[in-house]
Amino acid sequence: MTDQITAEETTEDQTDEIQPEAQPEQVDTAQGDAETFPREYVEDLRKENGKYRQRAQQADELATRLHSALVAATGRLADPSDLPFDEAHLSDPDTLTAAVDALVTAKPHLASRKPFGDIGQGARPASDGFNLAGLLRSTAG
């Protein structure tokens, strides 16, 4: 009978050893909560991130305006917004010129139609009288 009691005691000792191992798991979950950040710190980080997003958005808007101004400066397109924005156009003028050339070649109706030269309109120098030969000479050249 003493052998049976000893066996029962050893099983009780084994169950006691299992229970303390379960307790550290509960402590681990409590430590996980201790690693969270305070609410104020998280709000400050979110505000800072929001400021950076606003700056980035403003930079994108300024880059788009600069692109439109550079396209308008070429004078080759009627509407500068016809050429889609590309960041490479801002840093390399040759790329911008090539893109405008390609667009005008593919879609000639987007080219600027600004007249140049003497088209017979506007202010003319005053003359003493009408001279048909002088008029023909001025428009022929």
Image (cartoon, grey):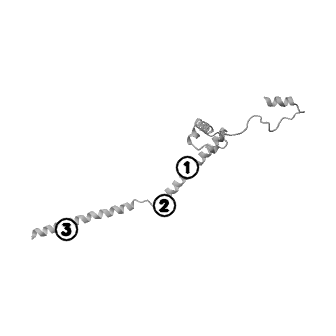
Whichever of callouts 2 and 3 sits on the residue coming sooner in the sequence is: 3
Disc nearer the start of the sequence (1/2) = 2
Q: Where is residue 100 in the image (x, y as percent from the top left)?
A: 61, 38
Q: Viewed as shown, does residue 137 lie left or right of 44? A: right
- Reading the image, the residue beneath label 3 is 12
Amino acid type at image mark 3 = Glu
Residue at 19% from the left image edge and 68% from the top image edge: 12
Of 77 and 21, nearer the camera is: 77
The residue pinned by badge 2 equals 40
Category of crowding for the residue at label 2, using alpha-carbon neighbours closer than 10 angstroms: few (below 14), some (14–19), many (at least 20) = few
Residue at x 50% of width, y 57% of height: 46
Q: Residue at x 56, y 42 (%)?
A: 87
Q: Position of residue 121 (x, y in %)?
A: 80, 38
Is tag 1's residue or tag 3's residue first in the polypeptide sequence? Answer: 3
Q: Rounded to the nearest whole Å, what is the CA distance between mark 2 and mark 3? A: 50 Å
Q: Name the residue under label 1.
A: 56
Q: Is residue 14 depicted above or below 130 in this figure?
A: below
Q: Residue 17, percent across and down?
A: 22, 64
Distance CA(mark 1)–CA(mark 2): 25 Å
Give, as a three-letter code, the residue at label 2.
Glu
| Front tag of 2 and 3 | 3
Label 1 – label 3 distance at C-alpha = 67 Å
Could you tell me if the residues under marks 1 and 3 are in contact, i.e. CB atoms within 8 Å? no
